[in-house]
């Protein structure tokens, strides 16, 4: 039945009305990726300080999971069967694990293997060294079976109670692997340079649907004993382990076109689908820019509000926060971003977290090219300017060493590298190259870069080699103009930067001057003529040289702003966030209920952490409030978010 519905919908391509048949049980069976599994190429491993693995001795090439999800105990338990290759004579393999309960390591025939766990590091976890029963032979693929269970506080997993979902009836589980959290639910070599194919059989209570970042082999599940169903998955393209992802809950699906669609809770599906219709055109635009989309389907899973990130580029199935569902498609650049990772990140992958800008800087650049192709140059420029301004704030606040593109994160959590430097300075660097060589030449190079380096880990040094060989080609004058070494290895911005400018922001800046400096009433602001990016520009305005805890508005101005722009009823999360930053910094009491609703209603770290920082800075007024709101909100938050907010508030339970 669903097939008939689907093809009618697919034929009607992007027409919303034709898809009004509503949710269907399964996505169209767009089978394996159109590209055959890539030839495995020899890889020169570089040292990854965030993994215990020694891939030059023995490495995991495939992971097969057989796990049961138990929502009573908040545990996944079962086995991971690892396929391993290595140098002839290798006698052991070193894996990464963190916070796992290990039961046994065996051969596929069931013979126990010796293993040992090394010292525990709170961020990196422990090395798990498994001794083979006989040395590896040349060309051999060895299999080992690890029986284990995850712990209820596994950092990659969030187990939601029914009350924490939209439906309120069924529990929910989702994972977040990047950067080094996969080791808290899968015992494997958790380094982005060690690519692995994977498959899984997951059982769950039969009211739930299980989805993964892989081919869905059983879109309806299959019986697996009383009250349970099993779901099987396969990913044939080798991926870095941070891209292994799972979701399980009361989830329904609605297609957008024949290769794209949306999964989310049934009561949220219509709105999510309406919002995300532009996805189909984005995939087409991305392919036209930089080559075929090789992963087969591109679906989105819109998660419950506790999802700690905006989006996560899990292959075939981007995970997204529900805070992008604004009602007017104004925040869909996030889809462009996660989609762009299907090339920058998922095909060509940062070899280590020190090279994170190769994932995110390339992706922000590519994201903006997709936005330009779909929405035009002006919209793309507006988003560039917002990103550029945010970069300037970041550069002013970080220690200089952390403003280099190539990082040195030894001894630190790779999360520390997740700043605007990787994202926006990285993108600004690529735009600088584009400007100096011309877009046409730049695009030819970038398309080639993805082709040449697909399925390979990329270091900053190999990037430099690639661009020098294929783009600069010994042109000494160009080499000097580009200042590539300065961009990468020096703090701050090299002298050849050019700030993006959007004409659409000129009237916004004039209105901000009139209201915030000259004291004009907010009713003079043409708010309803502006798009979301212009509104964010307006609310992001700050006086020159503002002190960190300084005020720039009077209580009467705040009341005017709030009432005239209808901010208490605003539905766009980015605008609510921008407004609350102003209101809380001014200790504006009437905004407290809205802050409470916002902070207890979603757990996206990008919103939660800065708002608690703002409250904390308003000591006598803000700290008791922060403590009260955090006590209320914290049970909703994912470990990624609490891990950042706990230290700020000195939270000890
Ligand atoms: N891959 C990142 C998310 C990430 C990075 C998770 C590092 C864990 C460690 C994802 O693509 C991303 O950048 N998400 C952004 C949104 C994007 C539009 C800039 C986010 O979640 O804010
Ligand atoms: Zn990203």
Image (cartoon, rainbow, N blue to C red):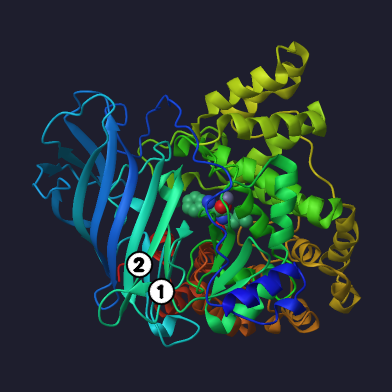
Q: Does the residue labelled 2 lie within 8 Å of ligand 1?
A: no
Q: Distance between the residues labelled 1 and 2?
A: 10 Å
Disc 1: which residue: 634
Foreground mark, 1 or 2, reads 1
Disc 2: which residue: 651
**Residue located farthest toward the bottom when viewing the structure as drawn:** 169
User: Residue 511: x, y in percent?
Assistant: 88, 65
How crowded pointer 2 is (Cα within 10 Å; few <14, some 14-19, many 20+) is rated as few
**Front residue (pair 87, 157):** 87
Location of residue 611 by image quarter: bottom right
**Image quarter of the N terminus:** bottom right
User: Cβ–Cβ below 8 Å for labels 1 and 2?
Assistant: yes
- Please state if 283 lies on the left or on the right of 58 as rendered: right
**Front residue (pair 651, 165):** 165
The mark that comes first in sequence, 1 or 2, is 1
Residue at position x 30%, y 61% from top?
A: 154
**Image quarter of the C terminus:** bottom left
Secondary element under disc 1, as helix, strand or loop, is helix
User: Residue 523: x, y in percent?
Assistant: 88, 79
**Picture quadrant of ligand 1:** bottom right
Q: Is residue 120 visible?
A: yes
- Please state if 159 lies on the left or on the right of 131 as rendered: right
Q: Can residue 97 be seen in this view?
A: no
Residue at position x 36%, y 64% from top?
A: 157
User: Residue 323: x, y in percent?
Assistant: 60, 71
User: Residue 558: x, y in percent?
Assistant: 73, 77
């Amino acid at each position: 039945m669903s097939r008939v519905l689907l093809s009618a919908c697919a034929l009607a391509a992007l027409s919303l009305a034709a898809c009004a048949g509503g949710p269907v049980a399964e996505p169209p069976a767009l089978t394996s990726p159109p590209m055959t599994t890539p030839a495995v190429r020899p890889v020169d491993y570089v040292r990854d300080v965030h993994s215990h693995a020694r891939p030059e001795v023995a490495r995991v090439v495939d992971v097969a999971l057989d796990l049961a999800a138990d929502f009573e105990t908040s545990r996944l338990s079962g086995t991971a069967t690892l396929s391993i290759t290595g140098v002839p004579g290798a006698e052991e393999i070193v894996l990464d694990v963190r916070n796992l309960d290990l039961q046994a390591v065996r051969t596929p025939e069931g013979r126990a293997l010796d293993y040992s766990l090394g010292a525990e590091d709170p961020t990196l976890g422990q090395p798990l060294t498994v001794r083979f029963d006989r040395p590896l032979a040349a060309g051999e693929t060895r299999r080992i079976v690890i029986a284990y269970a995850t712990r209820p506080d596994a950092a990659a997993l969030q187990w939601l109670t029914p009350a924490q979902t939209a439906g309120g009836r069924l529990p929910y589980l989702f994972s977040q692997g990047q950067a080094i959290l996969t080791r808290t639910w899968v015992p494997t070599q958790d380094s982005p340079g060690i690519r692995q194919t994977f498959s899984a059989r997951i059982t769950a209570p039969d009211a739930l649907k299980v989805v993964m970042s892989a081919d869905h082999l059983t879109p309806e599940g299959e019986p697996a004993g009383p009250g349970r169903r099993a779901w099987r998955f396969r990913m044939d393209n080798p991926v870095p382990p941070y891209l292994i992802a799972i979701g399980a809950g009361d989830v329904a699906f609605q297609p957008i076109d024949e290769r794209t669609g949306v999964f989310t809770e049934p009561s949220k599906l219509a709105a999510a689908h309406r919002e995300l219709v532009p996805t189909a055109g984005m995939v087409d635009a991305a392919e036209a820019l930089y080559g075929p989309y090789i992963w087969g389907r591109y679906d989105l899973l819109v998660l419950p509000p506790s999802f700690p990130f905006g989006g996560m580029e899990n292959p075939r199935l981007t995970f997204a926060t529900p805070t992008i569902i604004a009602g007017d498609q104004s925040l869909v650049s996030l889809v462009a971003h996660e989609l762009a990772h299907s090339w920058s990140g998922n095909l060509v992958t940062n070899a280590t977290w020190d090279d994170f800008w190769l994932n995110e800087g390339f992706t922000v650049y590519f994201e903006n090219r997709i936005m330009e192709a779909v929405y035009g140059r002006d919209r793309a420029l507006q988003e560039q300017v917002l990103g550029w301004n945010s970069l300037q704030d970041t550069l002013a606040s970080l220690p200089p060493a952390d403003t280099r593109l190539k990082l040195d994160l030894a001894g630190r959590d790779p999360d520390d590298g997740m700043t605007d430097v990787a994202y926006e300075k990285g993108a600004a660097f690529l735009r600088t190259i584009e400007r100096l060589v011309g877009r046409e030449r730049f695009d030819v190079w970038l398309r080639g870069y993805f082709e040449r380096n697909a399925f390979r880990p990329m270091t900053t040094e190999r990037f430099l080699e690639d661009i020098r060989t294929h783009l600069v080609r010994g042109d000494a004058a160009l080499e000097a103009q580009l200042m590539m070494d300065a961009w990468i290895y020096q703090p701050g911005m090299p002298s050849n930067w050019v700030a993006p400018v959007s004409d659409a922001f000129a009237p916004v800046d004039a209105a901000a001057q009139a209201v915030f400096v000259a004291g004009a009433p907010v009713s003079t602001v043409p708010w309803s003529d502006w798009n979301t990016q212009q509104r964010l520009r307006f609310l992001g305005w700050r006086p020159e040289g503002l002190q960190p805890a300084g005020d720039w508005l009077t209580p009467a101005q705040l009341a005017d702003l709030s009432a005239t722009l209808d901010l208490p009823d605003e539905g766009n999360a980015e605008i609510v966030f921008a407004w609350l930053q102003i209101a809380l910094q001014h200790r504006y009491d009437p905004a407290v209920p809205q802050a409470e609703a916002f902070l207890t209603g979603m757990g996206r770290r990008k919103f939660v952490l800065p708002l608690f920082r703002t409250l904390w800075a308003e000591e006598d007024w803000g700290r008791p409030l922060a403590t009260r709101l955090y006590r209320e909100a914290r049970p909703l938050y994912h470990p990624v978010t609490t891990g950042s907010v706990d230290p700020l508030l000195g939270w000890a339970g």
